[in-house]
Amino acid sequence: MSFFSPLRHLPEPAWRALRGALAWMVLAAVLDGLAGLALVPLILAWFDPTQASVAQSVWLLLGLTWLQALVGYSAQRRGYLAGAGLAARLVTRLLEHLPRLPRGRHQDHQGLVRGPVFSSMGIPAHLLAPLVTALVTPTVVVLGLFAFAPRLALWLALAYLPLFGLLRWAGRRNLDLEQRRQAVDRQAGQLLQAFAQQQALLRSAGDASQGQQALREGLREQHRATRLLNRRALPASLSFATAVQLVFSAVLVGGVLAVAAGDLPGALLVAVLVLLVRFIEPLAQLAQLDQALRMAWQALAQVLAVLAAPTLHSPQPGAQPLDASLQGQGLSVYGENGEALLEDLDLHCAPGTCTAIVGPSGAGKSTLLALLGRGMDPQAGEVRLGRVDIRQLSERTLAAHLTQLFQDSGLFAGSLLWNVGMARPQATLAQLTEVAQQAALDEVLDSLPGGWHSDVGPDGALLSGGQRQRVGLARALLSEAPILLLDEPTASLDARSEARVHRSLRALHGRRTLVLVSHNPALVRDADQILVLEDGRLSGCGSHEHLLATHPWYARFAEQHRAEQ
């Protein structure tokens, strides 16, 4: 079937384990059908006056039943192991793959592990075994019936084609409707989250009615979509189960007529009906199983599509930088619709100098910083670190020579000590204390009962935005990398902490190459060079005094800061 096509894209160890589990599932289903067929000679022997073969039929049934139970247990166990192995390998691949995606790509995949990966795990663990049973066991039964009641078996075999055509139609229809409803669910969830997060703003504005109206409309749309799904999906789901029941009824009626006409022994009809009753329930549930498996395949396909996305390639062992300079030549980056995010940009940051990047929102500042840190590669031009093309550096070499601090500092669940010290695991307490003072983190340490051993929570959730920024800055300062890239390093800090960080960054002059993006003129005015970006192009470059006298946008930028003071 078409929904098995994602299997060929699985990691080879996962596909190998799943193949083995699938083989055991098929064997268990075949034995299940054979055990059911063993009921037929048992019932026939029971109604035979001689009853000579009853014991033999009983032993045959018991043997097949025990064998099927053992094989079924092994199939179920292998299915669980294959599911756990699939999830583990997908998570491992994602951990290796996501950090190597170009900037912005991995941010769209935050819920992959919580959702699609664990949905994929259910394919071998919970869905394949009942699906295989529903497909294989009735097929074995129909084929076996040719030995006892060829005409009834032929009727059942001919009924298979319309049944599975109906199953395919119902599965595709339900899947399409379910996808539409999930899209509405996501939209309603986003509205609810935004409404909850913006309560302070709505209260301060004195008017929550507009936000409430948007939320209510989103929830009403979700309700309408759910009702539409139920109204349209229910007939599709019931149609297959009804068709299965009709086939069973047709066999019953046809069998009774055949017995009445003397063409079929009554004992054989009883045996066939007992056998069909035993296997009609899993066959009737095939529509629901098919839909659940299609949804799980879709989740798996989502993960595999991410894993198939091209990553930034880094050679091993790669070249070595000659110094701590950064240089960009003819850098151009284009968006998905072909719009220029950066175009033909040149810059040079000499070793030990400070370069500040400023410009209006959307000018391309963060994009340029991402290029310099190799968060992405340009469509044209090249970035050189230490006079070497940055694409020729290994990941380890790049990490040893360059440290980046983003606006939202990535923190891990664990202690402050671990989150800061991961930049230099061998750092002494004196070195940690020094960078804590430089980043104004010492005030945070004093306010926490556990000090350095305080837990920051998942993604730093137990800290405020300013506290997280100080942790990230302390980690960057602790790093021994000669080049620092900082994106708005003081955006979430109060004025006193900002002044302390400003002094710390000035102290790095001549010791490290510093490139920072900031909207704060007080932070950038002491830079050796200031780059002004507008609409993806470099519109000005020079010192604070030079740009103040020659660049209109920068003059307004500096004047606004003076007015705010």
Image (cartoon, rainbow, N blue to C red):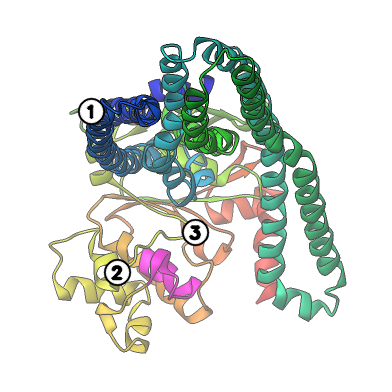
Binning the other alpha carbons within 10 Å of mark 2 as few (below 14), some (14 to 19) or many (20 upward) gives: some
Residue 557 horizontal/vertical position (percent): 67, 59
The residue singled out by tag 1 in the image is: 56
Q: Observer-nearest residue: 272 or 545?
A: 272
Q: CA distance from mark 3 to mark 1?
A: 78 Å
Left or right: 359, with 88 as reference point: right
Residue at coordinates 44% horizontally, 39% vertically from top-left? Answer: 127
Considering every residue shown, the one lying at the far front of the view is 49
Q: Which residues are magenta?
A: 457-472
**Residue nearer the viewer, 189 or 429:** 189
Residue 414's tag is 2
Dot label at residue 407: 3
CA neighbours of label 1 inside 10 A, class few (<14), some (14 to 19), many (20+):
some
Side (left or right) of 533 relative to 58: right
Q: Is residue 561 above or below residue 142?
A: below
2 or 3: tag closer to the N-terminus? 3
- Secondary structure at numbered mark 1: helix
Task: Identify which amino acid the numbered label 2 is placed on.
Answer: Gly
Quadrant of residue 209 in the image?
bottom right
Residue 362, which numbered label?
Answer: none
Q: CA distance from mark 1 to mark 2?
A: 66 Å
Question: In terms of sequence position, does the residue under pointer 1 or pointer 2 come before the other?
Answer: 1
